[in-house]
Image (cartoon, grey):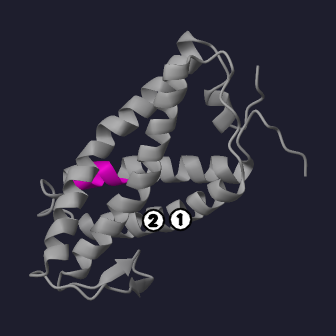
Amino acid sequence: MTTDATRYNAVARALHWSIGLLIILNIALALLGEPFEHVLWIFPLHKSIGILVLGLSVLRLLWRLTYKAPALPAAMPGWEKLAARLVIAAFYAMIILVPLSGWVMSSAGKWPISFFGLFEVMKFAVTKDDPIAHLAHEAHEILGLLFIPLVAVHIAAALRHHIILKDNILLRMTGRPLR
């Protein structure tokens, strides 16, 4: 197998786009969940997607630890490289902490946690009155809301690189040939 040091490999790209789309969908479901809870029960789907995101994120993290990411372009200013690294670090923290806090929070509830109706997910040994359940609830909501601007900044930066700077940053995460 040949590797291209200027782009992410196919596994990293597939995990990136899958996790990204699932996160955007889950943010929308979370925001729409309460207004539509009398019409459509969205939260079981939200929980299933969250568990899927957590599993894929663990795979993504393990993959990232074993496969080196392509270097950022030498022409990129130092501040921008630092900002990119900070955003990526924040993403790795969020893609683990947000679904994990949701899982802990849901474990304190009385309902089983179903994975798309296929099987029940193990619950952590917490109750509604446990401090960790309250912490998980607060963390899930706050971090979930912080995910919105983080995703927006990430998308805006990728589009800036592609449309304005016309460099290969966005193309590194696609299957398209680099310019």
Q: Amino acid at mark 1?
A: Val
Q: Residue 124 lies in what quarter of the image?
A: bottom left
Q: Amino acid at mark 2?
A: Leu
Label 1: how many residues lie within 10 Å, few (<14), some (14-19) or many (20+)? some
Q: Quadrant of residue 118?
A: bottom left
Quick check: is 95 in the magenta stretch? no
Residue lying farthest front? 78
What is the span of residues highlighted in magenta in the rendered image?
A: 26-30
Instruction: Name the residue located 15 percent from the left edge and 56 percent from the top edge.
Output: 36
Q: Which residue ends up furthest to the right in the rendered image?
A: 1
Q: In the figure, residue 134 lies in which quadrant?
A: bottom left
Q: Which mark is residue 152?
A: none
38 and 43: which is toward the camera: 43
Q: State left or right for residue 172 relative to residue 155.
A: right
Identified at 58% across, 19% down, the residue is 162
Residue at label 2? 54
Residue 113 place in picture, x, y as percent: 31, 80
In this image, 160 relative to 153: left or right? Answer: right
Q: Position of residue 160 (x, y in %)?
A: 50, 18
Q: Quadrant of the C terminus?
A: top right
Q: Which residue is mark 1?
A: 58
Q: Residue furthest top?
A: 164
Residue at 70% x, 42% y is 8
Say left or right for 117 vs 176. left
Q: Are dots 2 and 1 in contact, CB under 8 Å?
A: yes
As helix, strand or loop, the secondary structure at mark 2 comes to helix
Q: In this image, 132 relative to 96: left or right?
A: left
The residue positioned 19% from the left and 75% from the top of the image is 132
Is disc 2 surrounded by few (<14), some (14 to 19) or many (20+) residues within 10 Å?
many
In percent of width and height, residue 151 lies at 39, 38
Dot 1: element: helix
